[in-house]
Image (tube, grey):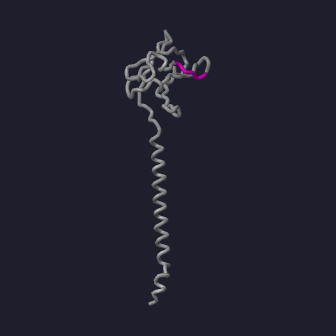
Amino acid sequence: MNIKNLFTDDDAVSPVIGVILMVAITVILAAVIGAFVLDLGGSQEKTPQANFETDYSESSSALDITHTSGDSIVVDRLEVTGTSNSSGSDQVWYEFGSSSLSSGDEVSSGDTVTVEANSGDVIRVVWTAESGDTSSVLNEYEVP
């Protein structure tokens, strides 16, 4: 047995070390990518779950919109928008923050707002995230 060849013969070690390094790199990359992707999902604000009922009075052209159940919503993030049948354009019909409710107050179950609406108008209760990047229609009503 040649002792000199024992220290220089490393053919069997190289493939094993190469496989171990490749597996380690793959595991580290998967952990970094997984942490990044999971962190992105938690950064979006969830849409509140709230129910609204509408009651239209044809004689007075008044549409009552009542928060009946679900999450309370900060007034700064809620507005009533719609499409007017006469003009065909979208517009803000009611801003909760401009009413008797002040900034930071919440719209909760039992709160009602009244807007003037005419036949064919489409009225929406819209929630907007604090960032302003996301919005959701919580209720939509077409005036008969």
| Relative to 40, residue 136 above or below | above
Quadrant of residue 70 in the image?
A: top left
Please name the predominant secondary structure of the magenta segment in the image. strand
Where residue 91 sits in the image (x, y, percent)? 57, 21
- Between 85 and 28, the residue placed more toward the observer is 28
Q: Is residue 12 above or below residue 95?
A: below
Q: Position of residue 17 (x, y in %)?
A: 47, 71
User: Residue 39, how many percent across, how many down?
Assistant: 46, 45
In magenta, the rendered stretch is 89-93
Q: From this viewpoint, which residue is outermost toward the bottom? A: 1
Which residue is nearer to you in this view: 130 or 134? 130
In magenta stretch: residue 53? no
Which residue corresponds to the image point at 58% horizontal and 19% vertical from the top-left?
85
Instruction: Name the residue rendered at 49%, 65% in the picture.
Output: 22
Q: Nearer the viewer, residue 71 or 87?
A: 71
At horizontal 50% and vertical 81% (from top left) the residue drawn is 8
Q: Is residue 81 left or right of residue 71?
A: right
Which residue lies at the image location 55% right of the left edge and 19% below the top edge?
121
Give the side of residue 103 with respect to residue 121, left or right. Answer: left
Relative to 139, is 8 above or below?
below
Q: Tell me if 90 is positioned left or right of 27 in this view.
A: right
The reply to whether residue 55 is visible in this rendering is no
Tally of numbered tags: 0
In the rendered image, the quadrant that contains the N terminus is bottom left
Residue 19 position, x and y percent, is 48, 69
Is residue 70 shown to the viewer in this render?
A: yes
